Amino acid sequence: MGSQLQQKTQGRTTLLEAVNVCLENIGEQPIDNLENEQIQDARVAQRTILEVHKEGQTKGWSWNSEFNYPFERDTKDGVIKVPESVVGFSVNRYAYNGRFQLRGVRVYDLLKRTFLIDLDTLEADVIFLLPWDSVPEAFNRWATIRAARIFSDRTLGSDALFKYTSKDEADAQAELERIELEQEQPNMLSGPYAFPTYQPHTGLMNRRVTTGYSIF
């Protein structure tokens, strides 16, 4: 069996494998599938993993963030709704005078104090929650190790019994951030946007004072 595994190409970490890492971290036997609702520790481990997975994504990464994402107004009720998977929503403050923000799954107009939007399309920078299989392996690896530590702490409450330590989590996070930097390639001049260089004049374009009149 060992030689077969040695010659087999390993795939991505599955949610089942992550759950088993959590179980083994407290000395419990691994499970064969995630459908068995009778194993309490397995259910708690899975909830912990998904909790950490969601928490980590809300920070925003190059692979779950989109800039100037268009949202269309519903022609029937006049509101703009966003998917429930959106956990970060920010409009261009200078383009829209800071009028719009996300409340629940609907866009709110702060100026008119209403959910009825007078624009056909609204663009925003957004962060999406992605499922387990749609995120990079490095992120799943970090989420697995962090969840294993949290699960062990909640279940046993003893650092001496942990298989994974804070150093393991820190190492996994460092690798995740290294890959993120390679993917995003940010710089202090243009940030994550696709500008060839710094353009200071763009910060003053369409700028308005609080009274609503142009400064020019």
Image: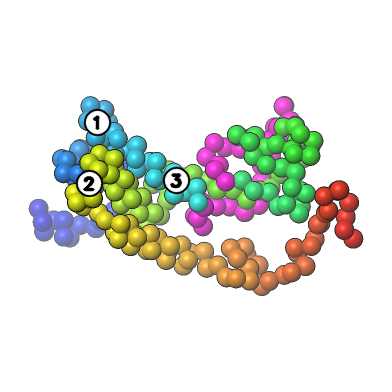
| Residue 159 x/y as whole percent | 23, 50
User: Which residue lies at the image location 55% right of the left edge and 42% below the top edge?
Assistant: 86
Q: Tag 1's secondary structure?
A: helix
The mark lying in front, picked from 2 and 1, is: 2
Q: Which residues are magenta?
A: 60-88
| Residue 208 x/y as whole percent | 83, 54
Quarter where residue 165 is shown: bottom left
User: Which residue lies at the image location 71% right of the left edge and 52% below the top edge?
Assistant: 92
Q: Examine the rendered structure and indicate whether residue 161 appears above or below residue 114.
A: below
* First-in-chain label (2 vs 1): 1
Can residue 157 be seen here? The reply is yes
Q: How is the image coloured?
A: rainbow
User: Which residue lies at the image location 76% right of the left edge and 52% below the top edge?
Assistant: 95
**How packed is label 2: few (under 14 Cα within 10 Å), some, or many (20 or more)?**
few
Residue occupied by mark 2: 158
Q: Tag 2's secondary structure?
A: loop
